[in-house]
């Protein structure tokens, strides 16, 4: 059990807390689900890119799925071996492509013909052969929130099957491209297995048809997306996930790559914030806390549900919104939740905040971003200091 009161007292609020033992067990569970098969769990760094989090996963054997050269640098700094790093993303700049190629990472995931052209040209310039995979859009509805759904043709991601096939043939003929893998990712917070299986089957068929023309791919990257419990969702068990994917790969000798982010870190993190005041406006009750949408954006941006708890308080509950001090009506963590009466200083814990929490934080309203702490085997350590006002204005002062 994590002592949230003690952590809030030592590190102040708002604060992010991560349970590194939970992260390790989620990683192990997923790795085990693919046992008996060549697999690489490439942690999606975007979910939580703290160096200590990446380093913790690297030590367990994880690779890294990165979507900017900044994330690639983080992964390398944190000790992820270069041969386990993937660089994805729909719009890579020339300088990012160049650095990825010179860093000799496992592969670049390409999302368009135009991008393939740039990678080929830069590889030629550097005198190297770029290992690539192509992101295929299997046109499957993942049945998740539209903002985090990516596998339909109406989304900007990947290329359709026919284009992918043409691009593989083109890449195969180029001296500067080495098509080693294939990739798809249909969405995030997936709670249904069928769309994943359908997508895998479509992509596996493409791999077979490429094999028939002697284009042999080594990596079958199924993306990320495994959902977690925020409220009372029924989620997919890792074993079932692995079995569904493996069942589509008969006759293929490929390494299965997956890129989970949320599944690994989502339920391993909490956001801690303290009550400042309560107020009632015409019967509507508000609990005002010291954290805000700039610290944890998911409720405001996606209307996402996060479980909330007032530590050490219960009973006499009545409905209230938990809101922050930012000057926006969208600044809330919870709406119409039964909550006990609170007093200034009470600690509110927002659950399932380990993924897409700190990484989406901003300095809106000139609010310094929270500190982050890790708990591992009962030991607590700070893994990112709280920002100061000076940190926030440093780059502006340099221009004065
Ligand atoms: N691979 C690719 C190509 C992705 O686009 C993503 C997430 C992942 C892997 C990791 O997905 P995960 O396993 O974490 O579901 N900010 C949103 C989530 C955006 C996800 C974007 N892509 C949220 O807070 O729900």
Image: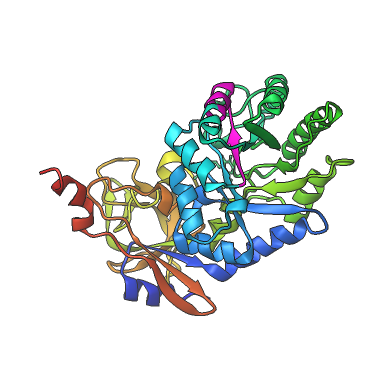
* View extreme (bottom): residue: 378
| Left-right relation of 360 to 399 | right
Coordinates of residue 308 in the picture (x, y in percent): 46, 59
Residue 299 in view in this figure: yes
Say which quarter of the image contains residue 184. top right
Residue 356 in view in this figure: no
Q: Is residue 184 above or below residue 332?
A: above
Coordinates of residue 188 in the picture (x, y in percent): 59, 42
Residue at horizontal 53%, vertical 61%?
79
Q: Is residue 315 above or below residue 240?
A: below
For the C terminus, the image quarter is top left
Instruction: Find ligand 1 in the image and state its quadrant.
Output: top right
Q: Is residue 119 a member of the stretch shown in magenta?
A: yes
| Left-right relation of 163 to 369 | right
Say which quarter of the image contains residue 131. top right
| Left-right relation of 381 to 181 | left
Q: Is residue 379 above or below residue 215?
A: below
* View extreme (left): residue: 400
Nearer to us in this view, 138 or 87: 87
Q: How many marks?
A: 0
Which residues fall within the magenta stretch?
106-120
Coordinates of residue 199 in the picture (x, y in percent): 74, 34
Residue at horizontal 83%, vertical 26%?
213
């Amino acid at each position: 059990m994590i002592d949230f009161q003690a952590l809030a007292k030592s590190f102040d609020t708002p604060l992010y807390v991560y349970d590194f033992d939970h992260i390790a067990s989620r990683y192990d569970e997923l790795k085990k689900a693919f046992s008996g098969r060549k697999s690489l769990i490439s942690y999606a760094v975007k979910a939580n890119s703290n160096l200590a989090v990446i380093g913790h996963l690297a030590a367990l054997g994880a690779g890294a799925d990165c979507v900017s050269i900044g994330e690639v640098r983080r992964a390398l700094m944190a000790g992820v071996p270069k041969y386990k790093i993937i660089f994805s993303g729909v719009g890579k700049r020339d300088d990012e492509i160049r650095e990825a190629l010179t860093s000799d990472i496992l592969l670049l995931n390409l999302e368009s013909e135009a991008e393939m052209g740039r990678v080929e040209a830069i590889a030629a310039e550097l005198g190297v052969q770029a290992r690539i995979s192509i992101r295929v859009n299997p046109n499957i509805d993942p049945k998740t929130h539209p903002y985090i759904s990516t596998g339909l043709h109406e989304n900007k991601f990947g290329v359709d099957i026919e284009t992918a096939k043409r691009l593989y043939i083109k890449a195969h003929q180029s001296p500067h491209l080495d098509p080693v893998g294939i990739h798809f990712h249909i969405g995030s917070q997936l709670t249904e297995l069928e769309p994943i299986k359908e997508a895998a089957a479509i992509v596996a068929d493409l791999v077979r048809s490429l094999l028939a023309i002697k284009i042999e791919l080594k990596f079958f990257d199924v993306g990320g997306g495994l959902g977690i419990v925020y409220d009372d969702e029924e989620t997919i068990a890792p074993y079932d996930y692995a079995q569904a994917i493996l069942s589509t790969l008969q006759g293929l000798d490929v390494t299965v790559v997956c890129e989970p982010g949320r599944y690994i870190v989502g339920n391993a993190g909490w956001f801690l914030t303290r009550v400042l005041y309560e107020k009632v406006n015409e019967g509507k009750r508000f609990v005002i806390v010291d954290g805000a949408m700039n610290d944890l954006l998911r409720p405001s941006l996606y209307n996402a549900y996060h479980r909330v708890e007032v530590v050490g308080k219960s009973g006499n509950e009545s409905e209230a919104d938990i809101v922050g001090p930012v000057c926006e009506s969208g600044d809330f963590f919870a709406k119409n939740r039964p909550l006990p009466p609170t007093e200034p200083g009470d600690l509110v814990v927002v659950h399932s905040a380990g993924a897409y929490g700190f990484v989406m934080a901003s300095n809106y309203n000139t609010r310094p971003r929270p500190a982050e702490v890790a708990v591992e085997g009962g030991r607590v350590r700070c893994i990112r200091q709280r920002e100061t006002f000076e940190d926030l204005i440093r780059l502006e002062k340099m221009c004065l």
